[in-house]
Image (cartoon, rainbow, N blue to C red):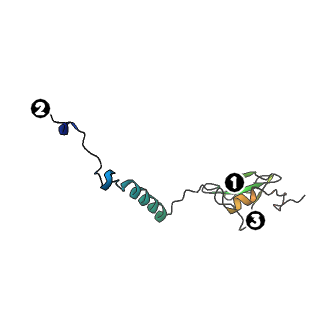
Amino acid sequence: MTVTAQQTRAPRTHRPARGGTSVRRPLPGIAVAGLALALLLTGCTSQERVCGSGRYPVKAVGNPDGQDCVADGQEPSEGWVRYPAGQVPEYVGDEWDRHWSTVVVDAEGRPATG
């Protein structure tokens, strides 16, 4: 039995289109779009929370970037203050996280001047 050149070729993975180029299958792009849509519909977020569940963020007195988390129901330790209502950072890099990272507060939680 003789083997011809056509019988020894590897099978094609893509069908040639006009002009000799290969047709690409859009499956990976569709899969990525579907995953992104699923994350949006389920409410998942890629943002990291400042504090985990059952904890709230506190600001270090006299330090622009000092931040920690305290268990709900507990007061902050000495040298730490609560953020003002409505100005509490929730996610790393959100508006209030960026704002407070440049502000030094006094023991009363007011921005220090000077």
Instruction: Check disc 2 and report its element: helix, strand or loop.
Output: loop
* Tag 2 residue: 2
Q: Nearer the viewer, mark 2 or mark 3?
A: 2
Question: In the image, 90: left or right of 11?
Answer: right
The residue under the point 63% across, 58% down is 91
The reply, left or right, for residue 49 in relation to residue 81 is: left
Question: SS of the residue at dot 1?
Answer: strand
Q: Amino acid at mark 1?
A: Val
Q: In this picture, is 63 found above or below 11?
A: below
Residue in view at x 29 percent, y 51 percent = 16
Q: Quadrant of the C terminus?
A: bottom right
**Horizontal and vertical percent for residue 88?**
70, 63
Circle on res. 70: 1
- Provide residue 24's location: percent of width, then percent of height: 35, 53
Write down the residue under mark 3. 84
- Res. 90 image quadrant: bottom right
Q: Position of residue 85 (x, y in %)?
A: 73, 67
Q: Residues within 10 Å of mark 1 (few under 14, many from 20)?
A: some
Dot 3, how many residues are within 10 Å of its Cα: few (below 14), some (14-19), or many (20+)?
Answer: few
Mark with earlier residue (3, 1) = 1
Image position of 89 (left or right of 12): right
In the foreground, 67 or 80: 67
| Picture residue at 55% right of the left edge, 56% below the top | 46
To which quarter of the image does residue 109 belong?
bottom right
Task: Decide which of tag 2 and tag 1 comes sooner along the chain.
Answer: 2
Q: CA distance from mark 3 to mark 1?
A: 15 Å
- The residue positioned farthest toward the bottom in the image shown: 86
Dividing the picture into quarters, in which one does residue 110 lie? bottom right
The one of 104 and 69 positioned closer to us in this rendering: 104
Q: Nearer the viewer, mark 3 or mark 1?
A: 3
Amino acid marked by disc 3: Pro
Q: Which mark is residue 7?
A: none
